């Protein structure tokens, strides 16, 4: 069964101007499943073997070493997957050879950052109403989606 799971295509809508919150979750899962997440999101441990917190300069140096150790083929695959998962209107944000930069650019463009955007999301959250024809599960998903966008 696991071979069947690994061979099935993961399908979700391409990134557009309105679906970043859902797209980012699906895209991260896709990259993890394909073994590409580690070249997009590079992490180093902030504590040493003794449980003591590392110095900021040590963490920065280890992060640079980890970034340089990334496999170029996997980086290219991650870039291709990210670029092919956006609509044509989003391609202007995808002009990098670094998958980390490609991943971070849409976040800067689409995440709610300003006071007015946050206020609009709060108003939408507070005034949304359940339709009579809407199943409870769908209603809960709408509320959770709005809460996720407000994070």
Image: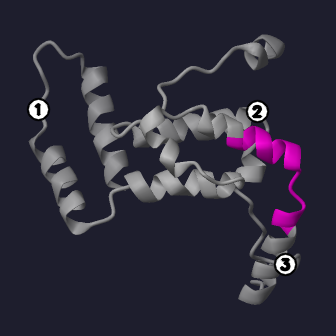
Image side of residue 99 versus residue 122, left or right: right
Query: For mark 2, what is the residue?
Result: 34
Rendered image quadrant of residue 5: top right
| Residue at left offset 51%, top offset 50% | 93
The percent position of residue 25, horizontal first and vertical second, equals: 52, 39
Query: Does the image show residue 98?
Result: yes
Alpha carbon distance from label 2 to label 3:
30 Å
Is residue 78 inside the magenta stretch? yes
Which quadrant is home to the C terminus? bottom left
Query: For mark 3, what is the residue?
Result: 48
Eye-nearest disc, 2 or 3: 2
Query: For mark 1, what is the residue?
Result: 129
Rendered image quadrant of residue 67: bottom right
* Total residue callouts: 3
Q: In front: 35, or 109?
A: 109
The percent position of residue 19, horizontal first and vertical second, equals: 38, 36
Label 3 element class: loop
| Residue at left offset 83%, top offset 75% | 62
Image side of residue 116 versus residue 114, left or right: left
Alpha carbon distance from label 1 to label 3:
50 Å
| Residue at left offset 40%, top offset 36% | 16
Image side of residue 104 versus residue 68, left or right: left
Above or below residue 91? Residue 51 is below
Alpha carbon distance from label 2 to label 1:
39 Å
Are the residues tagged 2 and 3 within 8 Å (C-beta)?
Answer: no
Please, what is the dominant secondary structure of the magenta stretch?
helix
Q: Which of marks 2 and 1 is nearer the N terminus?
A: 2
Query: Does the image show residue 55?
Result: no
Is residue 44 inside the magenta stretch? no
- Read off the magenta span: 66-79
Label 1 element class: loop
């Amino acid at each position: 069964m696991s071979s069947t799971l690994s061979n099935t295509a993961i399908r979700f809508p391409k990134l557009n101007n309105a679906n970043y919150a859902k797209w980012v979750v699906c895209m991260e899962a896709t990259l993890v499943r394909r073994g590409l997440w580690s070249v997009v999101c590079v992490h180093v441990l902030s504590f040493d073997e003794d449980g003591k917190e590392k110095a900021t300069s040590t963490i920065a140096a280890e992060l640079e070493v980890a970034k340089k150790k990334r496999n170029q083929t996997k980086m290219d695959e991650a870039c291709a997957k990210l670029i092919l998962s956006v609509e044509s209107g989003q391609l202007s944000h995808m002009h990098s050879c670094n998958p980390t930069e490609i991943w971070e650019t849409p976040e800067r463009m689409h995440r709610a950052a300003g006071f007015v955007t946050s206020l609009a999301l709060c108003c939408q959250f507070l005034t949304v109403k359940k339709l009579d024809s809407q199943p409870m599960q769908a209603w809960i998903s709408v509320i959770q989606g709005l809460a996720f966008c407000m994070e």
